[in-house]
Image: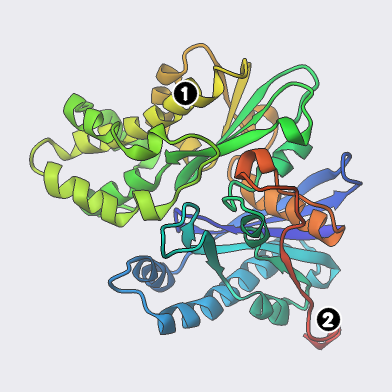
Amino acid sequence: MLAVGLMSGTSLDGVDAALVDISGSEKSTKVKLLGFQTTTMPEEIKDEIIRVLDSTQGSVDLICSLNFKLGELFAQAARQVCQDNGVPIESLGYIASHGQTIWHIPRPSQTERRSTLQIGEPAVIAYNTGVTVISGFRTMDMAAGGNGAPLVPYSEYILYGSKTESIALLNIGGIANITILPADCGLEDIYAFDTGPGNMVIDEVMKALYGQKYDNNGRTAASGKISAELLSELSQHGYISLGIPKTTGREAFGAAFTSSLLEKWKGRIPSEDIVATVTRFTALCIGEAFRRHILTRTCIQSLIVSGGGVHNSTLMSYLIEELPEIQIRSQEDIGYSSDAKEAVAFAVLGYETLNRRPSNVPGATGASRPVILGNITYPPFKTENI
């Protein structure tokens, strides 16, 4: 079956679309990546998302409109990846869309419910493509008492599990998340969690200090020195010491966090030193995750890294310093794509939804039981009417 997986993450750099051929049954699912591309997030839409994420600027009418705008953008991304690879879109069995996370509350307060909100209207995607759309993957897990994230561990179990080797899979997007697959594991043996910021703080600092979207290959960080005082302050962040399972996002490490950091440190130390230090902070959070939650229970032979962070050579060098005893490889080193990994993951989750099979991993999300994820939106007419 042909399918497209769509992912728009916390980095807000674009919509990832993975065209795959997927087949098989629960424990023998096979996935072949046929094509991948990233549709750049238009600046006006990115600005609207950032406004929505700011409680002082967001509004119900903006969220309502943005929900449909993103649906159109997601449909465009699905159509483009099919067109570029010579695949008629009507040949797709489904499109699986994670959506754009607007807010996520994994740890409720006295007045809040555990909840999550992803937008990018599936009816708009279905109408504009004529293809069945599977979306809303996080909500059923949260209904079952889970954090609604991370969700990629199931696909990692399908695609990367080894009979003989314990593997860690790290994705460094806006937020960094990790999955542990012990050797010869079952789903009940897997655990996963967000380690903390990935590229998010680095990108926000680069935007504020240099007017650039990101630190290209980590060059700015490489030109600076790590501030021991700033790194010590950052390392006191409460998320690091939380037990697992746990998840985080822009609520903890977004623009407000970076603004507060720069208000105190801008001008106090050189700008390149701030970039170097927050880059080291990302690596430190990952290292602390291993020391606190992983190495005490699993002997890891290999760490496989994906996501945008794999292209930041300074960040990768800091990661090697944090974890000198572990072999660190990229997805490309093992014949996969670092950039396509999460979009492929949602194509896998969509396949399980269509086949009415659970695809959350309670050991990763904290859910009370395995559940079938996602909502299905059928196309409103036959594909020849498009």
Q: Which amino acid does label 2 sit on?
A: Thr
Q: Does residue 225 sit above or below 358 in this rendering? A: above
Nearest the viewer among 34 and 129 is 129
Is there CB contact under 8 Å for labels 1 and 2? no
Nearest the viewer among 146 and 375 is 146
Residue 180 vs residue 126: left or right?
Answer: left
* Residue drawn at point x = 55 percent, y = 66 percent: 118
Q: Which amino acid does label 1 sit on?
A: Arg
Res. 284 image quadrant: top left
Colouring used for the render: rainbow
* Residue drawn at point x = 50 percent, y = 35 percent: 310
* Residue drawn at point x = 38 percent, y = 47 percent: 200
- Of callouts 1 and 2, the N-terminal one: 1
Q: Where is residue 272 in the image (x, y as percent from the top left)?
A: 21, 36
The crowd level at tag 1 (other Cα within 10 Å; few <14, some 14-19, many 20+) is some
Look at mark 1 in the image and give the residue it sits on.
292
Q: Position of residue 212 (x, y in %)?
A: 30, 52
Res. 220 image quadrant: top left
User: Secondary structure beneath disc 2?
Assistant: helix
Q: Position of residue 294 (x, y in %)?
A: 55, 23
The crowd level at tag 2 (other Cα within 10 Å; few <14, some 14-19, many 20+) is some
Q: Does residue 227 sit above or below 201 in this rendering? A: above
Which part of the image, by quadrant, shows the N terminus?
bottom right
Residue 198 vs residue 151: left or right?
Answer: left
User: Secondary structure beneath disc 1?
Assistant: helix
Look at mark 2 in the image and give the residue it sits on.
383
* Residue drawn at point x = 53 percent, y = 66 percent: 117
Nearest the viewer among 131 and 165 is 165
Q: Does residue 384 sit above or below 245 in this rendering? A: below
Real-space Cα separation, disc 1 to disc 2, in angstroms: 52 Å
Residue 16 vs residue 57: left or right?
Answer: right
